[in-house]
Amino acid sequence: MIATQPDAGGHFGPYGGRYVPEVLMSPLEELQRTYEEAKLDPEFHKELDHLLHTYAGRPTPLYYAKRLSQRLGGAKIYIKREDLLHTGAHKINNCLGQALLAIRMGKKRIIAETGAGQHGVATATVCALFGLDCTVYMGEEDMRRQSPNVFRMRLLGAKVVPVTSGSRTLKDAISEAMRDWVTNIEGTYYLLGSALGAHPYPAMVRDFHRVIGLEARAQILEAEGRLPDTVIACVGGGSNAIGIFHPFIADEGVGLVGVEAGGRSMELGQHAVRFAGGLPGVLQGTRSYLLQDEDGQIALTHSVSAGLDYASVGPEHALLHDIGRAEYTSCDDTHAIEAAVTLSREEGIIPALESAHAIAETIRRAPEHPGKIFIVNLSGRGDKDINIYRENLPELDRL
Amino acid sequence: MSRITQLFERLKAEGRTGMIAYLTAGDPSPDATPGLVAALERGGADLIELGVPFSDPIADGPVIQLAGDRAIKAGTTLKRVLQMAAEIRKTSQIPLLLFTYLNPALRYGFERLAADAMAAGIDGCLLTDVSVEEAGDYVSVMRAAGLDTVFLAAPTSTEARLALVAKYSSGFVYLVSRTGITGEQTSLSSSAMPLVERMRKHTSLPLAMGFGISTPAHVAELNGKVDAVVVGSAVVRQIERDPAGTEAFMRSLTEPLKGDIS
């Protein structure tokens, strides 16, 4: 049996932990205490479940993609439709949970980082819902490529702060959010958006997304009378993946496949494949696989998808990788865009670029597995990526 | 006895509060650093924190972030900083504290770092993102080699945490004057002095205070209240704007500390 909880210090095997400046240690201890209390409080779960049901739109469907499955002529493909959630991605699960914690702690100001903007939008949304002040840090490069989400955040009343340091992407937005938190600890809650960072974030964010896997498990048993053979999800920080994987970890027959961003090529700086090009190290509070140079400086990354464009990966994925419980693979920019076109045309579903990486792996694998059942997590919808699809598919504008 | 401990014993004997200067090693270039350290020493610095630049410095404000970017671009690595230390050691016995983040040290390897740092004349090490909970291996390797391990204590630290900081620190304890990142500020936080009193209850180690100390007035405010003050961003900014003025700038900051010698 694989341990599915971190130890008291937040370690998943040799990974995870709490590597932050001393100023943040007590606030993290306070957050952990609040979360542990909330976990045991039926009222907390009742309120969260009610919001997930009436506001976010849970449960999401598990949809049998019949045309896609038949075309590929192999595995039966089921799609977990997190894209149908309010705000268009799985991120709202975690934001509702953490916003309730912030309220419990009496914090009135919420800060967050965002890459693709989905977490930023979900944070801005819950802040509007609960009347909380909201500041979102976003890399300048990501603001450019995900501009619809920048506008959505502003429309929701959030302040979006451009981050101009480093690669101007998710990693730099996290650093800037941490600096804000260090400076404004009193009254500020840091609503981290992936299963990353210092303990308790990786376990807490995972717990708020476990609902994805719990629903999918019950839904596939209902539809097929058995568990799936393979569960596939994209992995940036890894929150949607750990959310759908976790309830299946004890089911030994169920294969778990995480898909990282292959970017342009496997040259360092051109991709975000931490499990192929990375080594264990410490970044932004946690120990995990890390793309770095020989001096321990963090490498730049590239992916067409801002949400997967990150040099490290959630620590629980690092453990699942090392013990072989999950398999990690990658998909490059071109195949992700092709997969998005395929899903759009075969099933009438335009995926987020992040989720398109998981779809691409599904398309690649399905023909070799007739009689098998796959579940792929469609973590977000593609509206935010319309400009990028458009740049990459110029022929569609000439029709 | 380490150079750091010797320094604080001497300061105690002289009844003087010490001056610790931080600079980002390799800014503006690796070759410039030994000369800048010499200028800081002539200006009255008693101990030098050699900042090893890291690509993602979560505890640093814009002044030190940008200095780190410049240093990395100029070819600064941990290995190169150790060479700078060896160069400084040829002419100076000033205590040197390596000041950086965990990942460059991890990549270098603790054992190798401890050996190479000792050989280069480094006296101790401070890794800003190593909490006492995660410090076990690091502390035992550094101490075995004879290096001091300095840890941060913050106004937010609980009593239990201060006790652990005391346990893992050697040489001195670095008190963070306020919550926040490195950088200059107009007046010292009201959280600074209570932290000194709280920390004193947990340790007999010397206490240095830093974060936000940038003017002679700040230094004067702390004179006699702590064993040393740390000036970081203000030094880095001086080097960025006018490296030739570094010695004079340091002298202006150490001026308020001289009045104590009776």
Image (spheres, coloured by chain):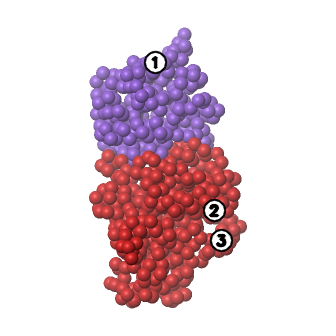
Ranked by sequence position, the earlier of labels 3 and 2 is 3
Q: Amino acid at mark 2?
A: Val
- Shade of chain A as shown in the rendered figure: red
The chain carrying label 1 is: B
Residue A5 drawn above or below residue B82: below
Residue A231: image quadrant is bottom left
Q: Position of residue A178 (x, y in %)?
A: 52, 48
Residue A399 drawn above or below residue A317: below
Q: Position of residue A338 (x, y in %)?
A: 36, 74
Q: Which mark is residue A85?
A: none
Residue A120 or residue A189, whichever sits in front: A120
The chain carrying label 3 is: A
Labels 2 and 1 within one chain? no
Q: Amino acid at mark 1?
A: Arg
Residue B49 drawn above or below residue A321: above
Q: Which residue is mark 1?
A: B251
Q: Which residue is mark 3?
A: A55
Which residue is painted at 39% across and 66% down in the image? A391
**Marks 1 and 3, Cα distance to the nearest angstrom?**
62 Å
Q: Which one is closest to the eye, mark 1 or mark 3?
A: 3
Q: What SS does tag 2 mark?
A: helix
**Marks 3 and 2, Cα distance to the nearest angstrom?**
10 Å
Q: Position of residue A312 (x, y in %)?
A: 41, 57
Which residue is painted at 33% across and 41% down in the image? B73
Q: Residues within 10 Å of mark 1 (few under 14, many from 20)?
A: some
Q: The chain drawn purple is chain what? A: B
Q: Which mark is residue A126?
A: 2
Q: Tell me if B223 is positioned left or right of A319 in this view.
A: right
Q: Position of residue B39 (x, y in %)?
A: 38, 21
